[in-house]
Image: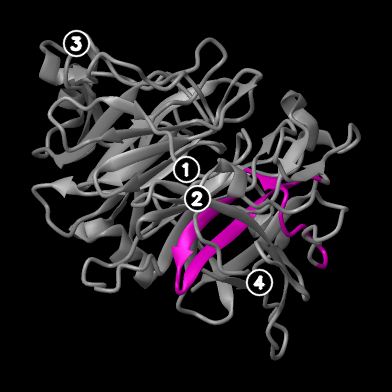
């Protein structure tokens, strides 16, 4: 496997100089490629106390890449970071996908939310179709109900993870000022008959019965009154077989391969993890299993990013504390947000988990304009044309055992990843990754030097 990359993003600095910005693919239902060519991004945190609630579209089929701001009617969600954005189906309305925004916060001391906002296309068209027209999008708060009154709905949180599974949303983990979580929830969205605003208010004030238990959010979005929603969102707490389960955590990644979740990393206060857990959602009573795989796992980290490419999961970045075999660089006390929680070591390189072979592959480091450090040493980069910055990485096979794992030297030493011009190549946190043609994209984040990034790195995997 090889990696190459270039970065060209045309957008104003404010448009994307941020971190902890959720995103979701919103390809049209008839897009048979299923490559995630259209990406929707929401909000995030900028420098200082800047939080955003803007909406951007990134079309990966356009050249050069450009962020386009989208406008939606309705009451917008409050500005936030560390929420989740997930494309889900509407039961009974095939091809009418909507986007669910859940949770998040405006910083650790500003409170957390369990509000649920739905972005939908007008006239029962999908969000993807409306976005392609650059009009006809509306934010709305659905009627939220608990499938079982005794279970309620998820608590307010940030740093949680959400994935789309069979048209529904699966939620795991997160934290707030009182609790850290390891719960699993399923959300389904359906349509309800039109009803008067008065009837909607009655339902919210006095819900009777488990199926009609309305759960108002613990915090709310901006705006005043609104008309009664035509969507109902039902939270189901997933019953887990009583067995071992991941420690409570936030800032982890959750990846879906087939019907199975894969949870990696995260933290609980100052405890940072690099354990790997899986949960098969197709089973009537799912059970957590901690996976022990061959090779050397990436160092413990939080705030990293992950993306699924076939039966492999690629991880990059995050923060932690240096440990044996780790590769990264330190932030210093004068670099502001980069030193929060005392986790000042920014991880570098790309790690890959081969799910089928149950093996960690050696971490590899792209080097701008020169090559990479791979298992056999430096590799010369291929020739490039124009302004593209291309890099390649050596072929990497799973290590036969832990002692065979290969890592590069820390930043500043021989073979370390060099910062890109005007930015930071690796060693970032709060960024996101998505599948793209021939590989993946790394977008934004906070670098070890305290600078917020507004770049898009195209990592070609072949």
Horizontal and vertical percent position of residue 52: 60, 44
- Magenta part of the chain: 421-448
Checking the image for residue 135, the label placed there is none
How far apart are the alpha carbons under marks 1 and 2? 7 Å
Residue in the image at 59% along x and 44% along y:
44
Local secondary structure at mark 2? loop
Q: Is residue 224 above or below residue 270?
A: below
Q: Is residue 433 above or below residue 244?
A: below
Q: Quadrant of residue 364?
A: bottom right
How far apart are the alpha carbons under marks 1 and 4? 33 Å
Horizontal and vertical percent position of residue 128: 32, 63
How far apart are the alpha carbons under marks 4 and 2? 34 Å
How far apart are the alpha carbons under marks 3 and 4? 54 Å
Horizontal placement of 227 versus 403: left or right? left
Checking the image for residue 206, the label placed there is 3
Circle 1 residue = 294
Horizontal and vertical percent position of residue 30: 21, 71
Circle 2 residue = 400
Whether the residues at callouts 1 and 2 have beta carbons within 8 Å, the answer is yes
Front: mark 1 or 2: 2
Assess disc 4: are there few (<14), some (14-19) or many (≥20) residues with their C-alpha within 10 Å of its C-alpha.
Answer: many
Is residue 425 highlighted in magenta? yes
Horizontal placement of 447 versus 9: left or right? right
Q: Residue furthest right?
A: 334
């Amino acid at each position: 496997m090889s990696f190459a990359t270039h970065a060209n993003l045309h957008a104003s600095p404010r448009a994307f100089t941020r971190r902890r910005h959720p995103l979701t693919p919103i390809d049209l239902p008839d897009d048979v490629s299923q490559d995630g060519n259209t990406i929707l991004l929401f909000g995030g945190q900028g420098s200082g106390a800047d939080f955003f609630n803007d909406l951007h579209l990134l079309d990966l089929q356009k050249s050069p890449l450009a962020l386009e701001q989208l406008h939606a009617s309705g009451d917008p969600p409050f500005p936030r970071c560390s929420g989740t954005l997930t494309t889900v189906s509407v039961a009974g309305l095939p091809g009418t996908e909507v986007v669910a925004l859940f949770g998040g916060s405006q910083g650790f001391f500003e409170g957390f939310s369990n509000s649920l906002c739905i972005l939908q296309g007008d006239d029962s068209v999908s969000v993807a179709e409306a976005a392609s027209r650059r009009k006809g999008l509306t934010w709305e708060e659905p009627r939220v109900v608990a499938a079982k009154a005794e279970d309620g709905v998820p608590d307010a949180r940030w740093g949680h993870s959400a994935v789309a599974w069979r048209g529904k949303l699966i939620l795991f983990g997160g934290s707030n000022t009182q609790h850290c979580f390891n719960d699993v929830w399923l959300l389904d969205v359906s349509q309800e008959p039109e009803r008067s605003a008065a009837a909607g208010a009655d339902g919210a004030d006095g819900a009777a019965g488990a199926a009609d238990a309305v759960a108002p959010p613990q915090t709310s979005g901006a705006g005043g009154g609104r008309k009664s929603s035509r969507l109902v969102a039902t939270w189901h707490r997933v019953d887990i077989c009583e067995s071992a389960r991941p420690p409570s955590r936030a800032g982890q990644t959750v990846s879906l391969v087939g019907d199975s979740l894969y949870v990696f990393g995260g933290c609980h206060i100052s405890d940072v993890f690099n354990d790997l857990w899986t949960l098969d959602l197709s089973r009537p009573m799912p059970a957590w299993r901690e996976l022990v795989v061959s090779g050397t796992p990436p160092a413990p980290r939080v705030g990293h990013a992950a993306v699924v490419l076939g039966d492999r999961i690629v991880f990059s970045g995050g923060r932690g504390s240096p440990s044996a075999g780790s590769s990264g660089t330190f932030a210093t006390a004068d670099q502001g947000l980069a030193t929060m929680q005392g986790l000042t070591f920014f991880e570098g390189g790309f790690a890959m988990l081969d799910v089928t072979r149950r093996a960690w592959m050696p971490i590899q480091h792209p080097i701008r304009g020169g090559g990479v450090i791979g298992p056999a040493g430096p590799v010369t980069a291929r020739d490039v044309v124009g302004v593209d910055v291309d890099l390649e990485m050596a072929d990497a096979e799973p290590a036969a055992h832990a002692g065979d794992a290969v890592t590069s030297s820390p930043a500043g030493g021989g073979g370390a990843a060099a910062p890109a011009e005007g930015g930071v190549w690796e060693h970032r946190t709060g960024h996101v990754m998505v599948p793209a043609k021939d590989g993946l994209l790394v977008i934004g984040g906070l670098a070890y030097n305290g600078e917020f990034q507004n770049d898009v790195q195209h990592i070609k995997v072949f």
